[in-house]
Image (cartoon, coloured by chain):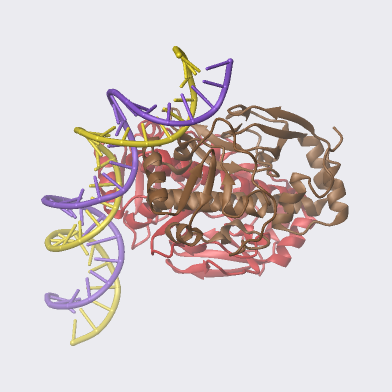
Chain colours: A brown, B red, C yellow, D purple
Amino acid sequence: MASQFDTSSHPLIRKLEVIAPVSGAERQAIAALPMTVRDMKPGQDIVSDQDRPSQCCLLLEGFLLRYKIMPSGRRQIYSFHLPGDIPDLQSLHLDVMDHTLGTAAPSRVGLITHNNMRAFIRAHPRIGELFWRDTLIDAAIFREWIGNIGRRQANERVAHMFCEVYVRLRALHRADEGRFVLPLTQVDLADATGISAVHMNRTMQFLRGAGLISTERGQIKIADWEGLQELAEFDPTYLHLRQPPEPEPEHNGRAQPASPTARV
Amino acid sequence: MASQFDTSSHPLIRKLEVIAPVSGAERQAIAALPMTVRDMKPGQDIVSDQDRPSQCCLLLEGFLLRYKIMPSGRRQIYSFHLPGDIPDLQSLHLDVMDHTLGTAAPSRVGLITHNNMRAFIRAHPRIGELFWRDTLIDAAIFREWIGNIGRRQANERVAHMFCEVYVRLRALHRADEGRFVLPLTQVDLADATGISAVHMNRTMQFLRGAGLISTERGQIKIADWEGLQELAEFDPTYLHLRQPPEPEPEHNGRAQPASPTARV
DNA sequence: CGTTAACTTGATAGCATTCAACTAGCGTGG
DNA sequence: CCACGCTAGTTGAATGCTATCAAGTTAACG
């Protein structure tokens, strides 16, 4: 129950700092947030469609997917979630889940009861506002995905998705310069971008052939950042980062070891 | 500046009642919310991509579109907005607009300064929570659109969109049974569903030919509600309505007169 | 070293786009 | 009053992107 993080390495603090300044007192409060830590294997669901959860899930380490399986069996992935995200914060105000939240990589999550979360927000209204802001940024990302899937063709779409993940990971200091771990299969990527798995494979061959990316052992290497952004029409405004991504990033943080199963 | 609505006909109250109960005192407060009313013609923008608005826009009457024009010129519509919606409530917490908000029909909007909005939320925290909840429902609708565009083919997609608009209008008592006004062109509908305008035309012919809908003077008539929902795999859970749509709706409210230009 | 999951490849089919006309309705101006 | 122009809707033909199906191949794991 006690926090295992100091106030600088706590994933939630690091995440909130990406979107707004966080004071010392606020850090203390966040680090003291009571939560139950749980380790999960890849491919496990945390909350499911139609559930009525009584707690929220803070991702401490790993990679989460938000998705839904339609009656016809088709799957759509709605978003990716990185450490510091609270993907089902919405359950605080929407009682029924309209989608499922699951792990894509080995993950450590902190479960926070709605009661504790409500008390915390009452006690720290400014962080409550930050939480609201965070859900609004989620919504902005959803919108961007709508446009990505609705109005771009496969190679542009996939390029855009890589741009987004890279920038988000960089902001969290969780990607090396031009390189990041993506613990997803091509099937996952296909379900996220609205194309078939076979075409995802061909699309990645195209991106590699065009010299925009390269892949190795579950890692994506951005071979031509300018070219990738250009193809994707990528503009990070919608991420509403406090500091826009640096054109020439310096070294800090490092990529995690690749997951054993996913190779991309 | 003074409210022109009694507490039962105020669009914002009617809208909030769709998602949660609203007390008498809260109605009074909402009706007294200071706003500047403005009438707009179709096709006008209210706030634009990259703007830094200092006020929010409450739709009192009409129909709004949220959209973005990409650098390549392609347009994607992200959402439709009905009376009672505050589509740019997010600008309270996200300073830069990442999309544009404009009218699709002759519309009356109420502009509320961020300062007034903040004071209002401070004075009525429960309504503040309702606002948060509303932006979360917006996000749920965005997610549904991602799945709609990403994993359904054109006829299913368009059917789903009609189902959604119909249910949302019904909930606001703004649609007759099986019939509603949709002040959008086929180009608009195409940009919302991620298909080409030509194919939207053919898709609507298909839906008409299948006996699912019929169209006349800017109105959509649901000819086969069951069939339409089935084709669309439509499940209204994601709208998070307080009362799920009635299978056999009774008569109340009536459709507005069709807009002179849009014919669908 | 067999098994499995993930990735890759080739061929075929199909849904949707694009281009280019053409029609219908409506308002404006001569 | 009718011609004109504009917008929205409709149609046909050709192209093309993407899906589907069916087999491989590769790499990790026990």
Q: Quadrant of residue C18?
A: bottom left
Q: Is residue C19 left or right of residue A238?
A: left
Residue B226: where, in percent of width, then height? 38, 30
Say if residue A259 shows up in the picture: yes
**Exactly how many numbered labels are in the figure?**
0
Q: Is residue B43 left or right of residue A168?
A: left
Q: Quadrant of residue B256?
A: bottom left
Q: Nearer the viewer, residue A201 or A158?
A: A201
Q: Nearer the viewer, residue B252 or B140?
A: B140
Q: Quadrant of residue A250?
A: bottom right
Residue C12: where, in percent of width, then height? 19, 33
Q: Is residue C13 left or right of residue A37?
A: left
Q: Nearer the viewer, residue B242 or A207?
A: A207
Say if residue B247 shows up in the picture: no
Q: Nearer the viewer, residue C11 or B134?
A: C11
Residue A127: where, in percent of width, then height? 78, 51
Quadrant of the image containing the N terminus of chain A: top right
Tell me which residue sits at (40%, 33%) in the image. Answer: B229
The relative height of residue A191 versus residue B108 in the rendered view (above or below) is above
The relative height of residue A122 versus residue D5 in the rendered view (above or below) is above
Residue A143: where, in percent of width, then height? 52, 52
Tell me which residue sits at (82%, 46%) in the image. Answer: A30
Tell me which residue sits at (80%, 36%) in the image. Answer: A115
Q: Is residue B125 left or right of residue A135?
A: right
